[in-house]
Image (cartoon, rainbow, N blue to C red):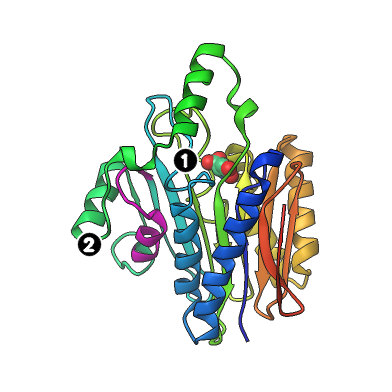
Amino acid sequence: MYGMIVHGGAWDIPDDIVDAHLTGVKKAIEIGLDILKNGGLAEEAVEAAIGYMEDDPVFDAGKGSFLNRNGEVELDAIMYHGTLMGFGACMCVKTVKNPIKLARMLMKENEVSILAGSGADAYAKNQGLEIVDNSYFVVEREKKRFGELKTKNLHPSAFFHHGTVGAVALDSQGNIVAGTSTGGTPNKLPGRVGDSPIPGAGAFANPVAGASATGYGEAILRCLLTFRACDAVEKGCSPSLACKEAVRFLEEKTGMFAGLIVLRNNGESGFAYNTPRMARAYLKNGKIVAEV
Ligand code: ASP
């Protein structure tokens, strides 16, 4: 048995980019499922699905990410292996084309689990990962947004239109792996780290379930949203109810917004969000469903 669920951010996704989101999450899960179908590992499926969305400029991950206050892109990613209880994460990287690949690499490291900033960029280069100039990540749409944020003095939340990406996969060997990758929030302070690369916040997995989150990073951090949901599933809760309860808890305690996906080791998936929309793709009766 195998299974997978992916998300492409939970915000007020405008109508004109809904189709691009649906196409992106559908393609990402197809890539992941193809790997799983052929006996590949959950970590390979998560890396490939998230890697695809990092390359797709529609999402706030890799190319197309929001710019920070200096007009640069800083990226965060995590991969969490539930069966092995191991994770790898990178923060504030500026030159690693696919931060999820670095996160997976760090998941295999004995010496270190998290690398940040220039140390993370240097490690990735030494390990032979693809390195790009920061300008590779910067697209026209985000340059325009950056300009508007500066001149109109708007709150960055007025621009929360697209988001972080995430995936959870179960392979035929029973491994559960979760991953998340992001460019963070628009106009963020250089060096700002949200929930995405933090274990238990942006992603978590235990031997029974894996989860990936998106939304207001500072609120997700306070609630350890993905840990909360996976723990509930381990104690017998369904993935769907675990997601609803975790998002309800976050809303009640912080008044903020988030979206969450969970996959259990029987292939059952669940999701919940309190934002207007969340892009996601999952399996229902063996068929891919993509929704916002
Ligand atoms: N949670 C991410 C962050 O705060 C943003 C997002 O999910 O869109 O960095």
Cβ atoms at labels 2 and 1 below 8 Å apart:
no
Residue at (57%, 51%) from the top-left corner? 201
Give the magenta-colored segment's residue range: 92-105
Of the four image quadrants, the one with ligand 1 is: top right
Which residue is at the front of the view, 183 or 20? 20
Which residue is at the front of the view, 45 or 93? 45
Residue at (53%, 87%) from the top-left corner? 173
In the rendered image, which residue does mark 1 sit on?
65
**Residue 185 vertical position relative to residue 115 in the rendered view, above or below:** above
**Residue 109 vertical position relative to residue 17 in the rendered view, above or below:** below
Q: How far across and how far down the image is residue 250, in percent? A: 72, 44
Q: How far across and how far down the image is residue 28, in percent? A: 55, 64
Q: Which mark is residue 90?
A: none
The kind of residue tagged 1 is: Ser
Whole-angstrom CA distance, mark 2 to mark 1, is 24 Å
Label 1: element kind = loop
**Residue 263 vertical position relative to residue 173 in the rendered view, above or below:** above
Residue at (50%, 86%) from the top-left corner? 38
Q: Which mark is residue 127?
A: 2
